[in-house]
Image (cartoon, grey):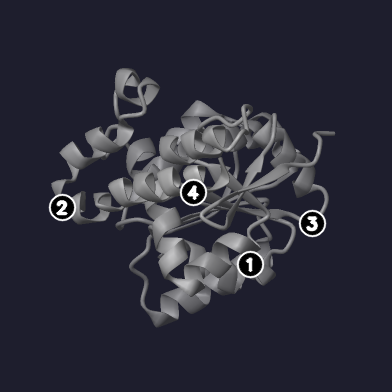
Amino acid sequence: MVSSPIVATVLKLPVHLVDDYTQWLLDRRQDGGAQVVTLNAEMAIEGERDPRLGEAIRQADLCIPDGAGVALYLKLRGYREARRVPGIELAEAVLTAFGRSPQHGSVWCYGGKPGIAEAAAKAWEQRAPGIQFSGIYHGYLDEAGRSAMLQTLRETQPGLILVALGVPRQEYWIMEHRHLCPNAIWIGVGGSFDIWSGTKERAPAWFCNNNLEWLYRLYQEPWRWKRMLALPKFAWRAFLETLRTA
């Protein structure tokens, strides 16, 4: 059994520090499930500005330091054990565990453009042959399609639910529907389906290892530049917070 998380704060939002996030989630699967939020600088700034997103973050059972800025902020505040935990890597570790031990339950996917979630699931069926998918839905369903999807979700009770609607829509959606499968692991995975399906490429290892994955993503999606303005704002806020508590 993994020890209880250390709860730190970033701009008054919780961040949980655990030695083994994957095992913690698998343990929780047997004891009431969990909602995971992957916190980066952009999301922290938005969560501070938007009370609804802030509430979704605070309600999560596990809020991981997804961004390098968040991990650095925590280190400056004295949490030496803080390290960046990319959300896509945590999701991959949990998927691998579900493939290795099908008794954890089935996997359910929602989000992305038509065909993307299906391609991602097929890639994982090859990567982890024991994995079982009980539901795969794209993010462009009409009202009737969404109603049918929710009915299937109630009936199948998957063990792992991956929602790829982007921040903050996926956090809102999970918060609204989590009661349907209270014993599942719920993770908002952003653009992970695109990566797993081969539609897009994750940043090369050099960018990831040097905390520059955001730069590679901006290169791939230049329209994101306005959202990236949150990075210097977060850095300034972190600096002020560090001075205030020094």
Disc 2 versus disc 1: distance between alpha carbons? 32 Å
The residue identified by callout 1 is 178
Give how far apart the Cα atoms at labels 4 and 1 are: 34 Å
The quadrant in which residue 19 appears is top right
At label 3, the amino acid type is: Gly
Q: Residue under circle 4?
A: 241
Q: Point out residue 89 in the picture as x, y percentages from the top left corner.
A: 50, 33
First-in-chain label (2 vs 1): 1
Q: Nearer the viewer, mark 4 or mark 2?
A: 4
Q: Secondary structure at mark 2?
A: helix
140 or 57, nearer to the observer:
57
Q: Nearer the viewer, mark 3 or mark 2?
A: 2
Instruction: Classify mark 3: helix, strand or loop.
Output: loop
- What residue type is disc 4 on? Glu
Describe residue 222's horizontal placement relative to residue 173 as left or right: left
On the question of residue 215 being in view, the answer is yes
Mark 3 vs mark 4: give the one in front: 4
Q: Are marks 3 and 2 in contact (CB under 8 Å)?
A: no
At numbered mark 1, what does the secondary structure look like: helix, strand or loop? helix
- Residue labelled with disc 3: 32
Dots 4 and 1: beta carbons under 8 Å?
no
Marks 3 and 4, how far apart at CA? 35 Å
